[in-house]
Amino acid sequence: MRYRLLIVVICLAIMMIANGCSPQLFDNGHSLPSSNTLVLFESEPQTLDPAMSQEVSSHLYVTHIFAGLVSLDDDMQPVPELAHSWNVCPDSLTYTFHLRSDAAFHDGRTITAADLKYSWERACLPETGSPTASIYLNDIVGVTDMLKGRAGSLTGVEVLGDHTLRVTIKAPKTYFLAKLTYPVAYVVDKYNVDSSKDWWRKPNGSGPFRLKDWDTGKLLLLQRNDLYYGEKAKLDHVAFLLSGGVPMRLYENGEIDVTHVSLSNLDRVRDPASPFHAELNIFPEYSLIFIGFNTTKPPFDDIRMRQAFAKAVNKDRLADKLLMGTVKPAYGILPPGMPGWSQTQKYSYNLEAARSLVQQAGYGPESPMQAANLTAPGQGGWVGHWLTSIIWEWTSELGLQIGVRQLDSAAYFDRLDAELDEMFFFGWVADYPDPQNFLEVLFGTGSKNNVGGYSNPAVDALLTLASTETDIEVRMDLYRQAEILVMDEAACIPLWFNENHLLVKPYVKDYTLNPLGVPRLAQVSLVR
């Protein structure tokens, strides 16, 4: 999934919390019992439509309001959700899912196999405009035809009864079940969708929480779904403040229960003498932050220029000094812990080699490179000190003029494809723990998220072989070979792998982030 952009927004406070078990009062008229309500400060979702959700902010809410056939457990393996079991044919092309008879929408209507078929077909209709159906449902027979408007139904999805769904895929894919854990594969209620254009403002979901209230720009409130077929949430409510102040200050004042730690607060949080030190939790994340190249136009259609820029980035200094050790320097595409990850390092910092590559590419004092721009999120001209440092080195050490052109953060990923410059900032968080979700999705020829247009037939061939290989060791080796080629050709400059630094109040139990960066709020409890 595309990375959530971290933006500090300072607004007027919208709430005051009293001590003890008295209600929490909000200036918009809402009140919540403080005894069993988790209060968080988060970004507002762009959508609550599973077919349209594609970034972390929306996923946080969608994954708790809706559900799919399968989900990922704590070990990041697919486990039953709406389906209590499934069978796979010997050729690994046909899956037969057996749905739970007690699975229901929030309004109590039983979920059937027909609801799943409808949901997937809706996601594949051109008029729906799903940005993710072509990525996560594309293995299913008939998806391509529907996306291109050549068919009105999915031939690879058959309803065999109220609680039996048969799905046929185009080729055996060991990660097919994992892809079905993505929101675009979640079930939605047809009657809810047909009720209005903005139906998702009042969604009839099926997850462990229901949407109780949403006051745009102020508060989004989830309530436990007592009809949930699985283990019921331990919390009565989860309140998300969508504005209202500086998160760290709210946390210090006891107004929110969890907060991310900013760089400006890191030193005092790390201080063993600090009262916050014992409340610090660090959660590694399957993510990659990188600078991409537009490989379809000069100067970065030349592999030597991409290699030169990559060699002129001091990643250790970036991670350890400028970002104060809150991230891990990235020397490859796959993050630590991800299947297929290796410690092979590429493009260590080497200014002399970088200068030589620039000269080999034909640039120098008598033939200077035209100024290039890097597309980045933001507004007002403010650029992070880490990016300033990288650009300064490119300019001062390589003699190359680089500018930054900002796109509005809220619409950055929506506008990036159409307004791409010579370079761009990008971040990716895994949707499922498989190398395919990084290497093929980000660097496969023609992939929707291959923003820079990188293309290498040798890489594509390896990715194609790996996608259908059933021997895990052989498969991982194929992905490692593909990663080496991507790095050799400097398709991007990996910068760092993220780690989430959170403060969690002592009375908040079992609040964790999985490697995909998503909390499991249903397992959280408050013990005061």
Image: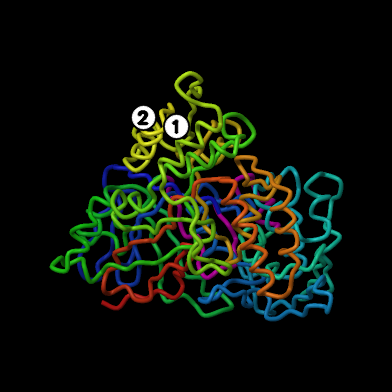
* Image vertical order of residue 354 relative to residue 211, above or below: above
| Residue 117 painted magenta | no
Identify the residue at horizontal 76%, vertical 66% (top origin).
468
Is 432 placed left or right of 330 in the picture?
Answer: right
Residue 406 is marked as 1
Q: Picture coordinates of residue 198 (x, y %)?
A: 59, 46
Pointer 2 or 1: first along the chain: 2
Please say whether residue 70 is visible from this viewpoint.
yes
Identify the residue at horizontal 28%, vertical 74% (top origin).
507
Q: Which residues are magenta?
A: 190-216
- Which residue type does callout 1 highlight? Gln
Please say whether residue 115 is visible from this viewpoint.
no
Q: Please name whichever residue, 289 or 23, is drawn nearer the observer in this view of the structure.
A: 289
Identify the residue at horizontal 21%, vertical 68% (top origin).
277
- Which residue type does callout 2 highlight? Gly
Q: State how the image is colored.
A: rainbow
How would you rate the neighbour count of disc 2 (Cα within 10 Å): few for under 14, some for 14-19, many for 20 or more? few
Mark 2 in CB contact with mark 1 (< 8 angstroms): yes
Q: Which quadrant holds the C terminus? A: bottom left
Residue position for label 2: 381
